[in-house]
Image (tube, helix red, strand yellow):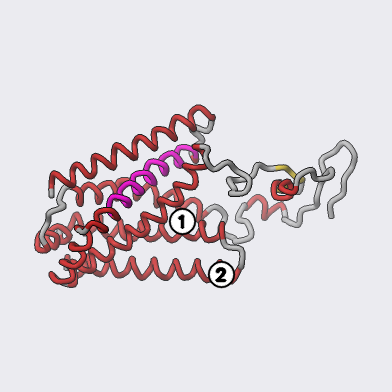
Amino acid sequence: MSTMQDSREATMIGRRSDGTLVRRPLSPHLQVYDMLQMTSALSISHRITGVIWTAGAVVMVWWLVAAAAGPSAFDAVQWFLGSFLGILFLMGVTAAAWFHTLAGIRHLAWDAGWGYDIPTVYKTGRAVLIGTAVLTALTWLMLLISW
Amino acid sequence: MSHTTSGQPPRQATLRSPLGRVRGMGSAKSGAHHWWMQRVTSIALLPLTIWFILSLATSAGMTHAEVLLWIGQPFNVVLLLALIGLTFHHTASGLQVIIEDYTNQEWLKIGLVLAVKGICWLLGIAAALAVLRIAV
């Protein structure tokens, strides 16, 4: 390779399977990328919402185990879920779950080779954000009606 | 190993055998299995999580007795067990990728991945046992 102009280049050099060296694009990286672009912001949000949903899964286990354990344990989990913090937590998990679901569908479409061009990437990105807001609101509307 | 000839891209001899390249299993000998299972579990979780979220959202005021009745229905038992297994499989593999991406020290990486897998197994078993105790 010619003399490096930029130290970041070292991280861009990969190797094809036949051994030839190739310059590859960097994946989103805090020191290099503008994280306020919709593409990188939604990318890291997919990971963050996955981790938040994990917290929701832990509460699901608590809820199931408490239901099996008996009325007093079940009352405790229901008290927490009905408290201010519990409702805030459930709202956060609902929004994170819908985002992770819709962004996950977007990822599956990419894996199938669809939607890689920039206009489509922005269109589906906006659809994920709007869809998350609409489905989260609908879920809580249903919840409030049945309560 | 590498040498530059003018006008040509630099070449580096590869130590991978042609057979290894064709098999495409990589150094971990599992190929794209981890990546593929993340997709498979995500597709299975799509209908399951939507069913679970909608079931809970439309019956928020259930008493303990009503919850036991709901969990105990055979249809719900089967879907709940599938949801629990797939949720923790998907969670463990997703958290593993995040840990592998952001952890630099090998001992910490292996320790965290093993801890996540262990916790996910225990949570999954506990949830499955709770459902089975209610149902059986």
Neighbours of disc 1 within 10 Å: few (<14), some (14-19), many (20+): some
Q: Residue furthest front?
A: A84
Residue A42, placed above or below residue B105: above
Please tell me in which quadrant of the rendered image residue A98 appears. Answer: top left
The mark closer to the camera, 2 or 1, is 2
Question: Can you give x and y, in whole percent of width and height, for residue A85 in the image?
Answer: 27, 58
Q: Nearer the viewer, residue A67 or A136?
A: A136
Q: Which residue is mark 1?
A: B94
Amino acid beneath label 1: Gly
Residue at mark 1: chain: B
Question: Can you give x and y, in whole percent of width and height, for residue B133 in the image?
Answer: 19, 70
Q: Is residue B22 left or right of residue A78?
A: right
Q: Is residue A122 left or right of residue B81?
A: right
Q: Looking at the image, which residue is at 19% across and 54% down?
A: B75
Residue B115, placed above or below residue A51: below
Which residues make up the magenta segment? A90-110
Residue at mark 2: chain: B
Along the polypeptide, which appears first: circle 2 or circle 1?
1
Q: Nearer the viewer, residue B104 or A101?
A: B104
Q: Which residue is mark 2?
A: B108
**Is disc 2 in contact with disc 1, using a CB cutoff of under 8 Å?**
no
